[in-house]
Amino acid sequence: MIDATILSVFLILPLVGAILAWILPERPNAQKTISVSVSIGLLAASILLLIQSVLAQKAGFLLRERIPLLSDWGIAWHVGVDGLSIAMLFLSALVQFAASVVAAPKERVRAYHSLVQLLFVGVNGTFLALDMVFFYTFWEIMLIPMFFLIAIWGGDDRKRAAVKFFLYTMAGSMGMLLVILVLHYKIPAEGVTVGVRTAEVQEQMTVERDGTAQIYDLAILSPDAGGKLAPVQASEIVKGSKSSLSVKILPNFDLLHWKLLAPYWANLRVWGFALAPLALGLLFIAFAVKVPVFPLHLWLPHAHVQAPTAISVVLAGILLKLGVYGLIRVAWPIFPVAALDGATMFAWIGVISIVWGAMAALGQSDFKRLVAYSSISHMGFCVLGLASATSQGISGAAYQCVSHGLSASLLFLLVGCLYDRAHHRRVDGFGGLAQIMPTFSAFFLFAAMVGVGLPGLAGFVGELSSLLGAWSNAATRVAGWVAASGVVLSAAYLLWTVKRVLYGPLRHSEQRAFSDLTITEWAALSPLAVLSILFGVWPGILQSALGPVSASLASHMAWVAGLVRGS
Amino acid sequence: MNPILSALIGLFLPLAVSVFGTFTWRKWGKALDLLSVGALLVGAIATCLGAIELGQSGASVSTSVPWLWFEGTGIVFSLGIHLDALGAMMLFVVQALGFLVLVFSRWYLHDDRFYGKFFASFSFFVFAMSGVVVAPGLLQAFICWELVGLGSYFLIGYWHDKPEASQDPEYQANKPFYATGLIESKLSPSSAQFKAFLVNRIGDFGFLSGLALCAWVVSTWSGFHGGDPLSWSTLFGAVAAGAFGKVTFLGFSGAALLTLAGLLVFLGAMGKSAQFPLHVWLPDAMQGPTTASAIIHAATMVAAGVFLTARIYPMLTPEALVAIQWVGAITAFVAVTIACVQWDFKAVLAYSTISQLGYMMLGLGSGAEAGGYGAGVSHLFTHAIFKCMLFLGAAAVIHALHGIQDLNRMGGLAKKMPLTALATGIGTLAILGVPGFSAFWSKDAILAAASAKVSIASVNGDCTFGALIPWILGLGTAGLTAFYMSRQWLLAFWGKGRDAHAVDHAHDPDKPSVIVLLVLALFSIQAVWTGSLNPASEHSWLSGLLATPLGGLHATAVGLPEELSRVIHIQTMVATLVLLVFGVGAAWFLYAFLPSQGERTAQWLRRDPPTNLVWQWLANLWFIDKAYDWLFVEGLGRRGGKAVAQADLSKCFSLDRTIDEAAGLTGWAGRFANFFQSGRSGAYAGWTLLAVFGALAIVLLYK
């Protein structure tokens, strides 16, 4: 078993990389080597974790570490990984690798590479954090490098795009901050005692030296003969002989404690208003901006068009996934009842994103903008799956994150290849490239097919699971039916693009001089392509990591809802 | 041979060849052809042996591995192999026809610039279709279904660098006035492949929804205890146990919900099997190599839809069957009328395929008790053989004429390429339904089934005039089929060459290809199928074999007394024979007799008058393609897309404007703050004093 210290690798490695890239003299190759080496290190670490997770197939945390920092305020350095965060860390490392390998800007190389590494400190930190203070901190850390990466190395309208990106995300995270503070202050100083499920305890339990059981660093209590709560022996929980279990939670920022408090939040009222729907709404907006969903998506096409290729890859490949991750990790577990109450609304938000994004993609003439809108459309499936709050739907959302990470990265890399050669991004400025660049064309068709959701490629599994999830919940069923039209629309805009760009006679004769893919482009593209096939042909690998986590969340939500609605 | 093993060979040998070929076809194209031909030969032999062993045991075999599962739900979707008599037979036909077509393609494409690519794509296509055939459940059927779509995408867009006809000045200068009826006037291969994929995706929308609906209903059914909810046995078990009666969706429940599920899946079949109104992709798919059309239109792709409909038969309610019957009848009729005015050799065959597929659906929709199931499936097999042969014959003709597909420039080819003319002639007789040839038996069975359905309804006392219409459309189609197929054969092979320059150097294909044609011709003769030349023989070994999987389904109408059933069959036979004579006679009169009566008549006849409204209506394909172009391509796609994109970009959303203004606001706030920080100490003192007094005032007032 690997120790939990491996988790700090995901933060320290890019941080060291950032410092090294900054202090070394400005030589593009030196900085690039650092970036690539860091990403390979992260890739190795995440593959190690992924193998562990696939073999373990457990819903709980594989590795977890909690060091109290400011005990008075209940702040602790609490990090941990389960199947979901491991899959995301893997995707993050993969995207970082692809983004580091492709051509980087030629000027201010030191700053560029440092900022990219810093960005990944934020990304990985968010995937690791289990304490809301750190979750929020990492979430915000991500913003600053991204802002500068767009604002300095972007296109002509880069400043406005960067400001827009920043303001949208900031406006969203303000709400998150408010929710975090309110929740913290709503835990009374003497603590709250809440009932917990035996199943959840069994999943997450650690055994103390004296034989008592603990979850999330909290003693598990059960009424003794005198009716007073007393610590329970681990063996009794394993046997399932205790009918009622409780934990007492003191004021803190711990995400997992807040998850256990879900029944408490659901009944809480603030100034006469029910807290949960309002707080969930704010959290949903904070995360939905990142996903992004209609109508909070307007920053994305702008940012993508202005960002340099590698940054577009990072943006689409991993940054958007943080929104979905936040919903799965924070919003849904803490406010399950409100999420289930709003299922129909959330599902329709997802469906509108699917359809609107696809229709907008149909009407684009700018290549990058087209791929950006396709991202909005594809990420809609994540929201749909999540809205259903079923095992299928949640794992579908997570799976779609990975598959879209692969397909969108591929597409942005390929658009970047074209831009490097033609120095423009107009879709109608190309035609018949299959004759000139056969390997490029094969990759492009492949990436489009991943996006289309062709079975046998990763995109299909996520879409299928999301749809099955949506159909399994009465509140999201009709939305799920409409969402299936996405399979037509995605084929329409992606294959139409394929047709216009790759096929037919060569439209611009000067493009005859275009070279096919270079070695570095190959190196960036092929891992993504291989994984798209692997995760499509054999979804069991990824599903072993994602499935248990999704099922556990779905059952948590159903249990809390039953508890709250029953009372 | 173990049937499972044979299926594995049939699946993975072509797949291996196609994967290998994808990476190597540019270098080793010339070696790839033998590799893929060999793979399919092995596959055909293996699946034949497997089918024989399965036929002897009479049972079905299946095996599967878990593929995708959802913790906590008990759902474990599996992939695997399920073989029964129907599947084993179909698998063998796919492999065997694939082998024959590839042998032919070696000659047909020998000097093509993408030579090796064809064999790689083709092998993939055969793999995907085999996957549909052996699917143990609805999910694998869908997965391989999509892969079939991908295979067709590759094959149709084979010559991907060809221009659109509208952008080809040379073509525009020389195009004949009747060009509306010519395939080559329409789309480039790359547009055709896009169109095929997209139209199929509309069907797949239905398939996917139907699949999700079934998965939901079955997995919440009390009899479901984990496993694959979409495997045939679980799904049909749930249907039989009334699982659909316990849930409601959009007001549908019970039989209505089951009908909805069946029709949603059938929508997928409508896409692949080119049923009206999703038939529009198929004629354009003619842009692929003709040998690709031979397999797409025979045993794969279009057959997949009919095969799927046969597979899901236990979940099709009577209401769903009525809809299927109507769809089939309308498809058959619409396509046959269009085929009558086509001047493109391949276009005639394309619409002929659509029309024959309509027949199969008409048969299936007539219901098992009317004998429709056996009839529809039998026609699937007989049609696969003779249509494959007709397309290969077309390939031979087009190759001999160096790419000319215009019937107007043919004629007299029988003397130049006698063996092709013979084989194609047998194929034409087969599709006509002439006694002694294969479709006589299977097509009559379909029409008899449609008629028997009406009889059953009248026996039950709920016969309406509307119920007669599918049967009438089917009969009309039979007559028109006789007309357009003999028209095609006469225009191409009969009389004198109208374009001497093109026709003079025509010759038969090389020996292996001719043998392929003749083998297929042999299998278009009825005796091979029924074991007897008796035209009324119904108890063929094929229908017997096919009847086993679903038990009690038979080509004869089991829902009627034997006497009545026999009468219906004889009536149908007489009716179709009369129509046949009229159809062939009309074609002979117009396209063989009159042209021999002088050049002027011939000239006038070849030019179907463009002013004729009926001709306009048919040559413009009932304006269906035009309407779709206007509604969906121009309207929804181009304009809708532009409108949405415009709306999104033009910041019509106040939110985006607010954010932009917020960015401005910070600047404004900065300037505001600047005002207080002028740097003059006097001003600072003043502001401080003001603040102190203000604070004092507030404290005093509110004390």
Image (tube, coloured by chain):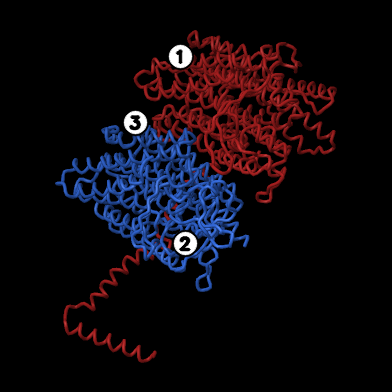
Chain colours: A blue, B red
Q: Secondary structure at mark 3?
A: helix
Tell me residue B453's x, y (percent). 77, 31
Chain at tag 1: B
Give amino acid for label 3.
Answer: Thr
Tag 1: amino acid: Trp
Q: Which residue is mark 1?
A: B107
Q: Which residue type does callout 2 highlight?
A: Ile
Query: CA–CA distance between discs 1 and 3?
Result: 28 Å
**Discs 2, 3: same chain:** yes
Task: Compare residues B359 and B481 and report the one nearer the observer.
Answer: B359
Looking at the picture, how far across and down is residue B211, in whole percent?
60, 39
The quadrant in which the C terminus of chain B is found is: bottom left
Q: In the drawing, what numbered circle is on residue A439?
A: 3
- Image quadrant holding the N terminus of chain B, namely top right
At x 38%, y 21%, the residue is B25
Label 1 or label 3, whichever lies nearer to me, is: 3
Question: Residue at 63% of width from left, 40% of height from top?
Answer: B214
Which residue, given by chain and number where applicable, does mark 2 sit on?
A249
Q: Nearer the viewer, residue B50 or B257?
A: B50
